[in-house]
Amino acid sequence: MESSKGFFDGVPSQTSFIFGIITGIAVVLMVSYLFGLPGTSATSRTNARVAENEAALVEAPAAELTPPPSAPVGPLPVIAKDDHVRGNASAKVAIIEYSDFECPFCSRFHPTMQQLLQEYPNDVRWVYRHFPLSFHPNALPAAVASECINELGGNDAFWAFADNVFGNQGGLGTALYEKIAQDQGIGLEAFRSCVGSGKYTQEIAQELAAGQAAGVTGTPGSFLVDANGQTQLISGAVPYAQVKAAVDAAL
């Protein structure tokens, strides 16, 4: 009886060996593509999806990720005469906000604080302190510009700057800052000289460090201080109703 021949029968052993290696490589490549071994395109696609998910988490609305109010972890600097204060200076409740002019969540929180002052004109004062994040390239220059506008135009000019910047975050830059300065009656030569001197950079860095020591880890980071000096940290762009409830409880 004649036996049936296999595919490799009659093929020289060296040729069979080489063919086997090629076949093995092909199988490995196919498995790598389908299941994503390290360094393969499938793994790269998976890593990309993970990065996208992490980015989505970071960019999620702050209100959804905001923990409940908590006590500061370190000493909070008292309100001083050189602080930027809006509202009744003798108000029972103070909200000290550590903020970043380029932060989108800060821009979202700004109208919340404006609304709060409208509803509590005598009971709430709003204090703005700088907390420019390192990954926001326009945050520090904007903070410096705001301090120069404050120096040359006063406290009202500072808050006009803040309102304009948070309302025009897509246009951050020298042109916007100089326009605001002119609108506040500040001469461009004096403004440019102040900004170019860099004299407020260290002061801004000290405010950021003080905020970090008090427990601020991101922006906006706000402290509600009641008439008895009791302080609670409110992290993120929390909804108006949440801030209002905290104020009502403190009054």
Image (tube, helix red, strand yellow):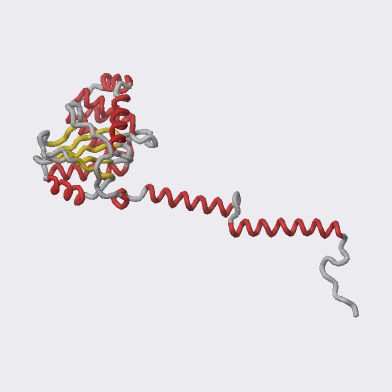
Q: In the rendered view of the protein, which quadrant contains the N terminus?
A: bottom right
The residue closer to the viewer here, 138 or 7, is: 7
| Place of residue 48 in the rendered image (x, y in percent of width and height, measured from the top left) | 50, 50
Image quarter hosting the C terminus? top left
Horizontally, residue 114 falls left or right of residue 8, namely left
The residue lying furthest to the right in this view is: 1
Q: Looking at the picture, tell me which residue is in the foreground, 214 or 95.
A: 214
Residue at image position (86%, 59%) is 13
Residue positioned 80% across, 56% down in the render: 18
Residue at image x 77%, y 59%?
Answer: 20
Q: Residue at x 15, y 38 (%)?
A: 229
Compared across the picture, whether 6 is left or right of 52 comes to right
Based on the displayed image, in which of its 4 quarters is residue 236 positioned? top left
Q: 42 or 181: nearer the eye?
A: 42
Residue 46 image position (x, y, % from top left): 52, 53
Residue 167 can be seen in this image: no
